[in-house]
Image (cartoon, grey):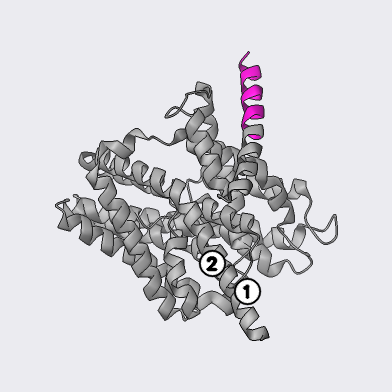
Amino acid sequence: MDQAIVLVTLGVLFLGGLAADHIGHLTRLPRVTMLLLLGLLVGQSGLGLLPEQSAAWFEPISVVALTMVAFLLGADLTRENMNRHGRAIFAISLAVVFGTVIVVWAGLSAIGIEPGLALLLGAIATATAPAAIADVIRQSGIKNGFTETVSGIVAIDDVWGLLVFSLCLALVHESGDWTMPLYHAVRDIGGAVLLGAVVGLPSAFLSGRLKPGEPLQTEAFGIVFLTAGIALWFDISFLIAGMTAGALIANLARHHDYAFSEIERIEVPFMILFFLLAGATLELDALLALGGLTAAYVVLRILARLIGAEIGGRIGRVPRHEVHLYGPALLPQAGVAVGMALVAAAAKPDWAETIMTLTIAATVVFEILGPPVTQAMIQRTARDRRAADRIGGH
């Protein structure tokens, strides 16, 4: 009977995801938002239609789906892309991360939140949602300098975010032992980069040999599952490992026509389940639990993104008409923030309830409202480009 429930639930979720995708096309809403809303509707905060065991599916599915996203984001970090947009990618990503910490910390401290707690919340606010942003870009079908730069930013900003979070955690650590949080950050990031190299280097030269021009689907499954599994085994970042491996393959696999075509083909069912189950796990009660503090946190994070991206865009010398668009495009926030919150809650039990409730509440807001804003920014760059082309044609 349990197997029947599992199979029926998966069948309904896939068909529901297909319907949500179609509705998204009709309403011009991002597929991500429609899938999250559908998941919210059928999940525990909604109608409660999913079986209890479905909650256990979310973690393994999210690991595989996000590892695939990481490979595809790493594929954007080619020499050609970095030569064109590297300055902007590094300037905007660093400015947004540090700007978010400073603005959120200062703003929350100003309204009476304990400075140490405000600092941790500011560090957690640096995280973005790589899966949501990558899916919006892919669904838009628009490939230009703006989308290439945003993909590059999303690929590396969580690296800066993890480092800053670890530093902030060290600063508020009561024992005064600041070495352990930094050690864990270096181990997490350094180990993930090493794993990405161990997987990516041989894959760059060995994959795609059986069928000239591109890897086989079985190779894609093997590389993704191997990377995700080893990362979990050693408790290091599967996102950074996948990104590193993807970047190495993209830059070194010269015998491929396109090294990631099979990952793009196989990721769709995983992404459907990931966003549906992510929506089902969202807790609407968290939105009401902290009231005004949640609203203040959301407003401060939006303000921080706008200010940080504005400064970073000017330093990165992006086109003037795009400077104001990067901040709104980087609003989505998801799993990495919740992971940081869990670590912070374990380190500071007295603040655990506030940290977890506020992070979950902000995730609900930014995961549902963020993708449509990202999509609007992408479409605006495309319209601006068409308008410029028409003017140039005259």
Give the residue at x 85% y 55%: 211
- Residue 377 part of the magenta segment: no
Q: CA distance from mark 2 to mark 1?
A: 10 Å
Q: Residue at x 61, y 64 (%)?
A: 247
- Decide if residue 261 is on the left or right side of residue 24: right
Q: Is 262 drawn above or below residue 204 in the view shown?
A: above
Residue 320 percent location from the top left of the image: 47, 80
Return the residue nearer the eye: 96 or 256: 96
Say which residue label 1 marks.
Answer: 386
State which quarter of the image contains the N terminus: top right
Q: Earlier in the sequence, mark 2 or mark 1?
A: 2
State which region is magenta. Answer: 1-14
- Which x, y percent locates residue 264? 69, 52
Of residues 55 and 60, the one nearer the viewer is 55
Residue 134 occupies quadrant = bottom right
In percent of the image, x 43 and y 62: which residue is there?
Answer: 328
Q: Is residue 94 left or right of residue 224?
A: left
Seen in the picture, residue 43 relative to 98 is either above or below; the reply is: above
282 vs 128: above or below? above
- Farthest residue in the top direction? 1
Seen from the viewer's position, the closer of residues 168 and 29 is: 29
What residue is drawn where x is 61% and y is 16%?
2
Q: Which mark is residue 380?
A: 2
